[in-house]
Image (cartoon, helix red, strand yellow):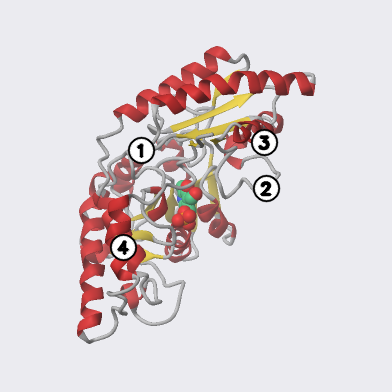
Amino acid sequence: MKKIYLDYAATTPVKANVLEKMMPFFTDKFANPSSIHSFGEEAVFALDDSRKAVAQFLNSHQREVVFTASATEANNMAVLGASNNGHIITSSFEHEAVLGPCKTHTDVTYLPVYKEGVVKVEDVLKEIKENTTLISIMYVNSEIGTIQPIKEIGEALEEVNKNRKNKILFHTDAVQAANYLSCDVNNLKVDLLTLSGHKIYGPKGVGVLYVREGSKISQILYGAHQERGHRPGTENIPAIVGMGEAIRSIDVNDSKKTKTMRDKVIDGITSSISGAALNGSRENRIANNINITFTGVEGESMLIALNEEGIAVSTGSACASNSLSPSHVLLSLGLSHRAAHGSLRITLGSMTTEKEIDELLTKLPPIVERLREISGR
Ligand SMILES: Cc1ncc(COP(=O)(O)O)c(C=O)c1O
């Protein structure tokens, strides 16, 4: 049985050109970039080259790019480093890597995201206080794929900041956006932005925090002086090289085919299975995400049945899937606990084919029917 992978929001395979570029840095070009000799120089050159690739993608200066060990680390650095004991505004459906550090603060506003799963700019502005220091809103939600109005928030905040002595920093977690949407930091008007290597066909264990020049963020890790002190620790050169090559390979304008397949899946499932409804806005949605609630069926049971047919999907974000509690993202849309438990996330990627989609659309309806018969619903 040929297996079908439809969980690209959890992680992506490393592209062949990315792996090829990384390989010498495990063996021949193994040096520490902090070493002054010629071996070290080679590593510095590779590090600089990747930084250049990321800066080009973000339309930023190279010195504003900080390599981290993951997007989780970058999000923690942004929230803990920029909040400066002030008031934070975030949304109720951020990734745990933003919500977790927010929980260590007492003064945090969690914005509603409504049924459509989209933050309202006016809600952000309404919540700004004298002591607000940081706004952190994700670019694309990892479970339901809804796109947030980052540019609009950035523009509105720029006006607000003109009349403030203590400027509010604006962070966005762009991990799920980078394959399909422009992450031009000057256009979005963000001060901090997070990326992850393994969501863009690069390696795991590497991320980026973009830090706009002049943004005051305090250190959360202490050690040597790598990454201008923001992220001490010997740089993971093979992974950073992979991140640079992966980012060079992104073409955000190349989403038409994925979008067409996404729409075919949404229409196919909601028209052939009764009680199946899309979660989150259809219009403001990333090209590769389908998240559907099925009444009267457990998400886990559907996932297991599909897995037996060789089709890999998920019930939510990979990080939350070990937990029995319903997804905080789906609850934030106003879904009941029962409905939140009956959801599937299907995410497409560069290797997804029409044939795979057709197979999913053939296999899923009888699975849902059988599970509903078993549960008597
Ligand atoms: C939106 C978002 N932010 C952050 C992360 C964490 O990324 P990493 O695995 O690089 O720590 C993920 C991964 O699921 C994500 O989807």
Residue 350, disc? 1
Element type at mark 2: loop
**Where is residue 318 drawn, in percent x and y?**
56, 47
Q: Residues within 10 Å of mark 2 (few under 14, many from 20)?
A: few
Residue 132 visible, this angle: no
SS for callout 4: helix
Q: Nearer the viewer, mark 1 or mark 2?
A: 1
**For mark 2, what is the residue?**
323
Question: In the shown orientation, is residue 375 left or right of residue 254?
Answer: right
CA gap, disc 1 and disc 2: 29 Å
| Residue type marked 1 | Ser
Residue 355 visible at all: yes
Label 3 or label 1, whichever lies nearer to me, is 1
Q: Nearer the viewer, residue 217 or 274?
A: 274
User: Which residue appears at 27% of the width and 60% of the height?
Assistant: 21
Relative to residue 199, is residue 252 drawn left or right? left
Q: Looking at the picture, which amino acid does disc 2 mark?
A: Ser
CA separation in Å, label 4 and label 2? 34 Å
Residue 220's place in the image compared with 57, above or below, is: below
Q: Position of residue 78 (x, y in %)?
A: 42, 60
Say what amino acid the circle numbered 3 marks. Answer: Glu
Return the disc, 3 or 2, that comes first in the chain's sequence.
3
Q: Which mark is residue 300?
A: 3
The mark lying in front, picked from 4 and 2, is 4
Upstream in sequence: badge 1 or badge 4: 4
Q: Nearer the viewer, mark 4 or mark 3?
A: 4
Neighbour tally class for label 1: few under 14, some 14-19, many 20 plus, Cα within 10 Å: some
What x and y, as percent, mark residue 214?
27, 65
Residue indicated by mark 4: 22
Classify mark 3 as within 8 Å of ligand 1 or not, answering yes or no. no
